[in-house]
Image (cartoon, rainbow, N blue to C red):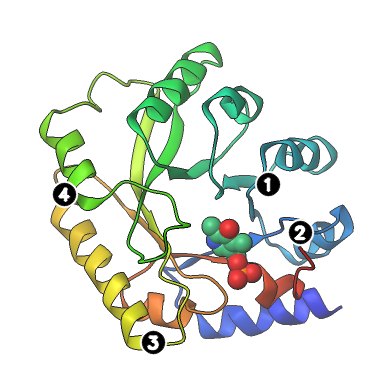
Amino acid sequence: MEIVENLIKISKIIPKNVLLVAVSKTKPIDSIESAYVYGQRDFGENKVQEMAEKYNSLPKDINWHMIGHLQRNKVKYIAPFVHLIHSVDSYRLLLEINKQGIKNKRIINVLVQIDISDDNTKFGFTYTEFNELIKLNKLKDLKNIKLKGMMGMASYSSNLSIIEQEFNELSNYFTEHKFNLKLDILSMGMSGDYKIAIKCNSNMIRLGSTIFGTRIK
Ligand SMILES: *Cc1c(COP(=O)(O)O)cnc(C)c1O
């Protein structure tokens, strides 16, 4: 099975402290099952409905990671089970996740997405916006949220030094804040740039096509 071969290959490349999130968006249940049987437990999806459907049909010890842009009115569909939301990009979204955490009697783990790229297509807080959030201590009342770390996506570029620079900048920013905010996750790196991300101290990578093959959409 090709998926398992790919997982074995990747496990030989990545350091032990780096968690692999297998990005299964658009891929069928049986592809996820193959990875699951091999031992993969962390899967990433970018659409709420697709994630909820897969959650319902697959074993309950899977850790589901929301990695795509999340609308506030859809948080309720994943709040009962989501393991980690990587893509928190506004204070209003944090408030909604906290509210759904209270409803579901859960503390929901989140990462803040920082907009580190030049592409206008990417979401996230700017460094300035997140600085402001911390300065105003706006997280302290959100008792049903646990801020675990930061996520970033580099520019879509063939210039590796630009990607490295963006990852390094986020890595330094993460290091600046990890002790006061008690953070431990730095989620950076996709199929095209995960090796660079790991060099820049990423400890969570999100790989789709490297594991499951290219996506059609
Ligand atoms: C799709 C996606 C990935 C995985 O992309 P690949 O290039 O297939 O590895 C990682 N992170 C996010 C946020 C994504 O949307």
Judge whether 112 appears above or below 14 on screen. above
Q: Which residue is mark 2?
A: 36
Q: Is residue 62 left or right of residue 129?
A: right
Q: Are marks 3 and 1 in contact (CB under 8 Å)?
A: no
Q: Which residue is mark 3?
A: 160
Q: Quadrant of residue 33?
A: bottom right
Q: Is residue 64 left or right of residue 38?
A: left
Judge whether 29 appears above or below 198 on screen. above
Question: In the rendered image, which quarter contains the N terminus?
Answer: bottom right
Q: Earlier in the sequence, mark 1 or mark 2?
A: 2
Q: Is residue 107 left or right of residue 168?
A: right
Q: Can the viewer see residue 171 in this picture? A: yes
Q: What amino acid is at disc 4?
A: Phe
Q: Nearer the viewer, mark 4 or mark 3?
A: 3
Judge whether 42 appears above or below 155 on screen. above
Q: Which residue is mark 4?
A: 179
Q: Is residue 9 left or right of residue 125?
A: right
User: Circle 3: is it few (<14), some (14-19), or many (20+) Cα within 10 Å?
Assistant: few
Judge whether 115 appears above or below 51 on screen. below
- Residue at 60% across / 22% down in the picture? 76
- In the image, residue 147 lies at what x, y percent? 34, 38
C-alpha separation, residue under disc 1 versus residue under disc 2: 8 Å
User: Circle 2: is it few (<14), some (14-19), or many (20+) Cα within 10 Å?
Assistant: some
- Residue at 23% across / 43% down in the picture? 130
C-alpha separation, residue under disc 4 versus residue under disc 1: 29 Å
Of residues 150 and 131, the one drawn nearer to the viewer in this rendering = 131
- Residue at 17% across / 51% down in the picture? 177
C-alpha separation, residue under disc 3 versus residue under disc 1: 33 Å
